[in-house]
Amino acid sequence: MMLLSRRSLLAIAAVVDVALHARPTPVAAKLLAARHDLPPRHLETLLQALVRAGILKGVRGPRGGYELARERRRITAGEIARAAMLTDADEALGPLPTSLLVENVIAPQVEQASQAFLAVLDAVTVAELCRQAEEAKAVDSGRASHDFTI
């Protein structure tokens, strides 16, 4: 059972991908989406949320894309997950249930579990995830790392 939302999982994957591929030029959203087999439009709103959170930096122009806004060791998986959760992805689910049971019993327990879960993610840095990806040879070098689109 996955406790992390798909959006948060994608956000962490995107930031680690940018950390691994953004040298010497920024990572284009199109290439990032291709590496993760996603439509670029699906990814763009998430990338912009990460820019607003100060995790990624958007670079404009023909060689533009995304790069880390800070050092790898200063960005945690918990911070990325929180930034992804701030977006309005859950609006399609409708309103939250409201009752004394939810407010007084269930919500406090879920909040406590969420905080513990995010605390574990706060201990994981992007630098550590990059190191693990390189050790596991999980860095996809098979796809083109350059965009030759005219």
Image (cartoon, rainbow, N blue to C red):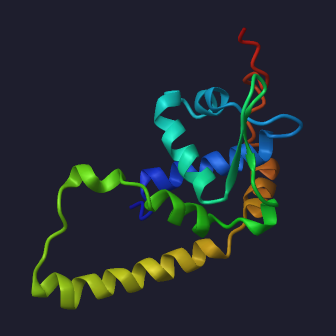
Left or right: where does residue 55 sit relative to residue 4?
A: right
Q: Which percent across, then down, holds residue 142?
A: 75, 25
Residue drawn at the location 40% of the way across and 86% of the way down: 112
Q: Is residue 44 left or right of residue 87?
A: right
Q: Residue at x 72, y 33 (%)?
A: 60
Q: How many marks?
A: 0
Residue at (79% x, 39% y) in the render:
21
Return the residue nearer the eye: 56 or 129: 56
Q: Which residue ends up furthest to the bottom in the rendered image?
A: 104
Q: Is residue 26 above or below residue 93?
A: above
Q: Quadrant of residue 26?
A: top right
Going by the picture, which residue comes out furthest to the right? 24
Judge left or right: residue 68 versus residue 117: right
Q: Is residue 17 left or right of residue 49?
A: right
Depth order, front residue of 136/104: 104
Q: Is residue 100 above or below residue 136?
A: below
Percent coordinates x, y for residue 9 in the rendering = 52, 53
Residue 123: x, y in percent?
67, 76
Q: Residue placed farthest to the front in the image?
A: 61
Residue 66 occupies which quadrant of the picture? top right
Residue drawn at (79%, 22%) of the image: 146
Q: State which quarter of the image contains the N terminus.
A: bottom left
Q: Position of residue 121 (x, y in %)?
A: 59, 71
Residue reaching furthest to the top: 150
Q: Quadrant of the C terminus?
A: top right
